Amino acid sequence: MDEKTDQLAAEGAEALVAGLRSAGWERVRDRFTEWFDRRGQDECVHALRALRGPAEFADTEKPIWRDRLSEALADAWDLDGADELASVMQELSLPPTGEAPAADLTPAPVSVPAPVPVPVPALASAPDPVVPGDRFDFQGITVNGQFVGVQHVRQTGGDAPGGAPQSPSVDWPSAQDMDPLAYGVRPTRRGNGLPQLPPYVARDADPAVKSALEQTASEGGLVVVRGDAFAGKSRTALAAMAEVLPDVRVFAPARHENLRQLPALLRSLPGERCALWLDDLDGHLGDGGLEPRLLAQLTGQGVAVVATMSEDTYDEFRKSSRGRVLDLAHIVELPREWSHGERKRAGETEDPRLKEAARRSGAEGVAGYLAVGPMLWEEWQRARRADRHPRGYALVLAAVDLARCGLRGRLPQDLLVQVHEGYEGVAGLDRESVDDALAWAAEKRHGVLGLLTRSGARTWEVSPCLVETASQDETFPAVDGAVWGVALEVARTDSAYDSNVVVAGARRAFRVAAEAGGRWAMHSLGLLEESLGDAGEAETWFRRAAETGHAEAAGRLGRMLAERGKGREAEPFLEAAAEAGDHMAATLLGRLLVHRAEGWLEAAAKAGNPEAAHRAGDLFLGKGQLDVAYVYYVVAERLGLAEAARSLGAYNLLMNRPELANVWLTRAMSAGDRGAVALMSFTGRASETLDDAVEYLEMFSDYLLDITHLGVVREKQGRLADARRQYEMGYEAGDAYAAYRLAVLYEKENRPAQANAWYRLAADMNHPAAKKALGEKPETPDTVTE
């Protein structure tokens, strides 16, 4: 026991022993007997009740009674024992009505272990004369803790007209003027243009409450509206009072306020009908509060006492002596879960909050949904802090956002985890695991609602009140585009959700953000419209996004234009996307440019440009149009482009003509084409014979280059005279390579003079290998080989 409580027991023993010696010993005995009886101290009760006159207690009795008081105060469950003992000593410091003060009844200053003093009701002032017993005398007493009493109303000084005393007055409200929020009703979510509280919805228990009030209005008594927390008890009781007792003045004391002098106060208000409002009755029971004798006095004065009490506290107090007054109460039960009829009435009101609650609430009932919702929202917002539950906050946010997208009902846990990991700016996720965060979110707040509710092994549902508040709070961030993308994909693949609802919501959200300049929203809207088959609308939004620099939208627009045959218009958009790393756009752009290049190269080749003819051949060769490629290569060769020899060699390799390929590649190598050297290694990998090559070349004997090529084949066959004749014919046709081949042939035959003569002729025709043979620097820096 602490020091203050021990001191209180000592002071109580001092007052008890002194009081039992005085003329007012019976009053002292009865009050202390009552106090000990409430504590279950039967031995003390018997000892006091055995007294039949003033006790001849010696001072040695004080330690005995101090120990008895200490023992009674030591009971942990009896939280009001110290307050009640202090109140008893204060009461006994004054004489009872009609008695002279007893000098030895004034105790020493008392120190009460409780909070600071709190004054009681704001009633009218009461000047002298003072009627004994109507007030507490604070002289000679020290109160360090809470002390609550009733400030009584007296008749004002002076006479009213006609000589009659003026009637006292109080500032208590009438039942019909009581503001529900000021007298115990919890606030709900506010809305633009909406009152603080939605209108009252008739409950099925209303007739029972009103019937009980009608009886107490005429006879007095106690009516208790009992139910689970947030069942709507206070609102229901106040509404019934406003209807049944509209003009009755209602006194609503603070919790633990001393009500003992209330009957005397009410007697001083003749003709004034009064009621007593005790919201959360457990705060008004015990010493100084409502108990059977006080209720009997109030009932005798026709006072209706209206109270509320939760189921849990009712069960608790029914086991305690402080709850005996409940035996005298008319109890009306108010279920927390609303019936079908109650929900229907709520849904028929004009208040959107009631409509929502009627539709969304479950076992918590409409009143619980409305009252707990704001508290749930506040706790969730505070959880974002890094030192609280940031991962829990993010998981709930994922559920709220997905629900706002239209994915109502069960949400897979994996989906919540996927979405919550994409939120930026939520610090401290590593403080708790996913399982711990979900366990925190699933805890029921106030025994009514959780942020999330488990609806399966790995599925969850978010509290609808969070979704509605987020949807209607203009300051709450809109759903991120990435979350919308996930929601659209889930809705398309999972029949548990209404994809039409999700699509419609996404279209609205994207359009609002796009019209505000959000390029991500423009692109997203384009993707959505494209998926729905509206190519025109999709193109419009892709174009708007691309014009703001959105590379992905530029790529999508470029592809759409290309598919419609508008390649030239598509090119700048595809190029922008390609430069941003879009390989698909780069590929399509390349194809478009190749197609355009074909047209221009063909035009240039027809105009006699050998390079254009050669490149056109390359393009057609790459497309697999080998015959067309060959024609352009031949044109390039005829126009004097040496590089075309290698291309013709490659062409012949593709056609499985290695000997012919060898002929062309040899020509290319002699012109200094290093690429031909690599291709030459492939000429021995097929089955073509020299005779096949001769046959093929003879078919094209009108082509001047093939005149020389036939000489190369004849040389390989050992038919040197035929080869020499072909080379001479080629030279006469203007082929420098023919002169070079003839010089090489003479050099092999060890006829240097003839060889040098032909090298000279070939060099004069600008053949690189011939110049090298003569020791002259060819125009190309590449090494020239045969």
Image: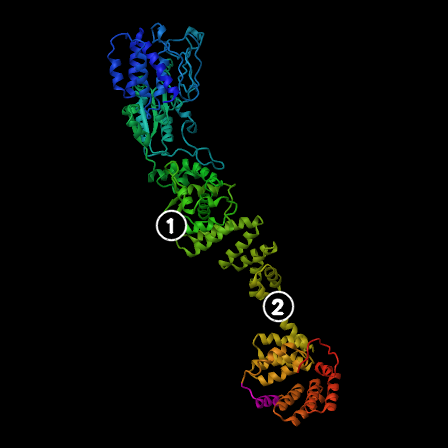
Residue occupying the far top of the picture? 100
Please rate how many residues cluster around mark 1, counting C-alpha atoms within 10 Å: few if below 14, some from 14 to 19, many from 20. Answer: few
Where in the figure is residue 492, as x and y percent of width and height?
44, 56
Where in the figure is residue 507, as x and y percent of width and height?
50, 52
Q: Is residue 606 above or below residue 250?
A: below
The answer to whether the residue labelled 2 contacts the one labelled 1, judged by CB atoms less than 8 Å apart, is no
Where in the figure is residue 565, as x and y percent of width and height?
58, 66
Mark 2 residue element: helix
In the image, the segment drawn in magenta is: 687-699
Q: Which residue is mark 1?
A: 458
Dividing the picture into quadrants, the one containing residue 607 is bottom right
Query: Is the C terminus in the top left, top right, bottom left or bottom right quadrant?
Result: bottom right
Q: Is residue 278 above or below residue 639?
A: above
Please rate how many residues cluster around mark 2, counting C-alpha atoms within 10 Å: few if below 14, some from 14 to 19, many from 20. Answer: some
Q: Which residue is mark 2?
A: 593
Left/right placement of residue 68 relative to residue 688 reads left
Does residue 692 show up magenta in the picture?
yes
